[in-house]
Image (cartoon, rainbow, N blue to C red):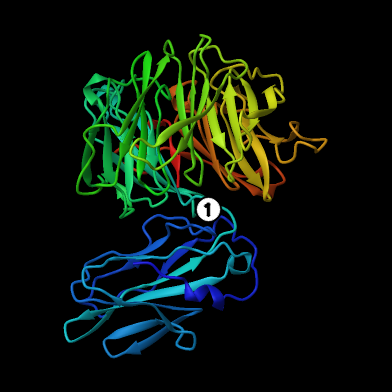
Amino acid sequence: MRCTLPFARAFVGALALAPLAEAQVERYGSSTPSTFGVGLGNGVQQSYGGNPYFALRLDGANPLGGAIFLALGRASIPVGAWTLLLDPLTFQALSFPLAPGVTEQALPLPNDPSTFGQPVDFQALLLHGLDLGATNGVEVRIQRDRTPLRAYLPGQDFSQGSNAPGQLATLDLSAWPPVFRSSANIGFAGTISNNYSAAVAVSNRANYAFLHGNGTTNQFVRVLDISADPTGSGVNHPLIGDIPLASGPTGSIARRDLEVTGDGRWLFSTSGASTIVLEVWDLAGLPGTLPTAPAQSITLGSVSGGATMLEVTADDRILGVCIGTDTAANDVILYDITGAAQPLVQRAAFQVPNRAGTGTPSALDFSPNGRRLLVVTGGTYSFYDIAVNPPNALVGGGTWTANGISTTSPLNGGALALRNGVLVGVFGENGVGGLYHLVDLSDPLSPTFGLVVSSFSTNPAGNISNHRVHAMGNVVVAIDGTGATADCQWVDVIDLDTPDPVTGYRSVRVQMPSATTLTPAGLSCIPREFELR
């Protein structure tokens, strides 16, 4: 069931992007009467302008039908046994009727600057016995840019010794400081050397998490239902099942990767010890049916233990693949995602500078509009215009200020982010006293293009490894991946739109939970290749 957003025309005035601490989607009030336990929410989906996948969801059953209503303000008006939580002066129907059994209402959001930041409130009224039951209220604010609500972090748990389970933790980025909402055992076989997931993928619909298996005993992609977005320790998301991989994936961090298209249709996985196979999985049968064989399988070649990274453009048009190799083979391959039975068609292939080494590549990232591509290999970065074919290297083998610390480590990560709406590269140094560096990548004709425009630390004089850095809009999330175990349990969250007189930008370091507690007192978990949604 889809709608044309009649409320969009009712928005008045353009508001600035709400700060990170202000929720994109906020629940308020409670369901009424007391015997009615159905709630209204959105799962975990970003309310950015132009998001075609946004939806409202009922938390319970809808056996008799009803409707979802909207207004431009809140209220609390008793109506018999239930309470109206919407302003009666702007009250109107979003969907009517909401048929029996239907629990999701598609709500594609307009990409109209005049609507950004303006609150719109929703409530569902459902048949309940001989009367009506009312859900809680939901307030939605459309964001200017894509700014994530959650970080999904798989991890290698050290809290219980060698038999500690692999885990999946969910970091709530809509609160400041960010807090972990849930942590759970993912049920992989083995010990801490191979029972964790090497990578996780989550679509924009945020219905499912796909966890890349590890070692020959976990030769699959595990699929979990995460739509309920629970809170607590030891919360195990419902298991949908496992998708078999072609060969046993390696146990090393980021040697293999996983991506899913934003619409949740296509899953891309890599596996193999030295010869890498890229497999494409058709997810159209979810949740009832999982694929048992790939729709397409592509042998990428031997990487001699090097890393493999995948990335999909925000509009689901292009899949990028980067492999670490010392041979004459191409390092970066771009595929058009056609939507056909075998959806990948090669678009371009090329080599990047400083490509040698089993730890490279360490970053692959598209710009929000899908016209630029960042590749970090061997401690240097290259930046490409992929709107032309073959791609044009705007920066080849660029470096960032080292501040006395070598940036040649293959573990230094990077990402593309927005600072006040302008595209920047975010790069990290590896070790004690390391810094983050922002590089201007907005306009090739600018005199500062390719140059460091800002440097800062989230942990002055402390360890910053930045093994993996991901960004969405102005929000940057980075993990520690080297050094002592105690130094590897931390996650940095940075807000590039909020300056700080001491650290440069508002930031916080949060410790990973263990599989059994959200507030570990000692050793917890080393996060691995993660996903922002």
Helix, strand or loop at mark 1: loop
Q: Is residue 469 above or below residue 256?
A: below
Q: Residue at x 64, y 67 (%)?
A: 15
Q: Residue at x 55, y 35 (%)?
A: 365
Q: Is residue 130 above or below residue 265?
A: below
Q: Quadrant of residue 188?
A: top left
**Which quadrant of the rendered structure holds the N terminus?**
bottom left
Q: Position of residue 160 (x, y in %)?
A: 28, 29
Q: Report whether 223 appears left or right of 258.
A: left
Q: Residue at x 43, y 40 (%)?
A: 338
Q: Is residue 264 visible?
A: yes
Q: Residue furthest bottom?
A: 80
Q: Position of residue 206 (x, y in %)?
A: 37, 50
Q: Is residue 51 above or below residue 10?
A: above
> In front: 14, or 511?
14
Residue on which the image places disc 1: 176
Q: Position of residue 207 (x, y in %)?
A: 33, 51
Q: Report whether 276 appears left or right of 373.
A: left
Q: Amino acid at mark 1?
A: Trp
Q: Report whether 160 appears left or right of 497.
A: left
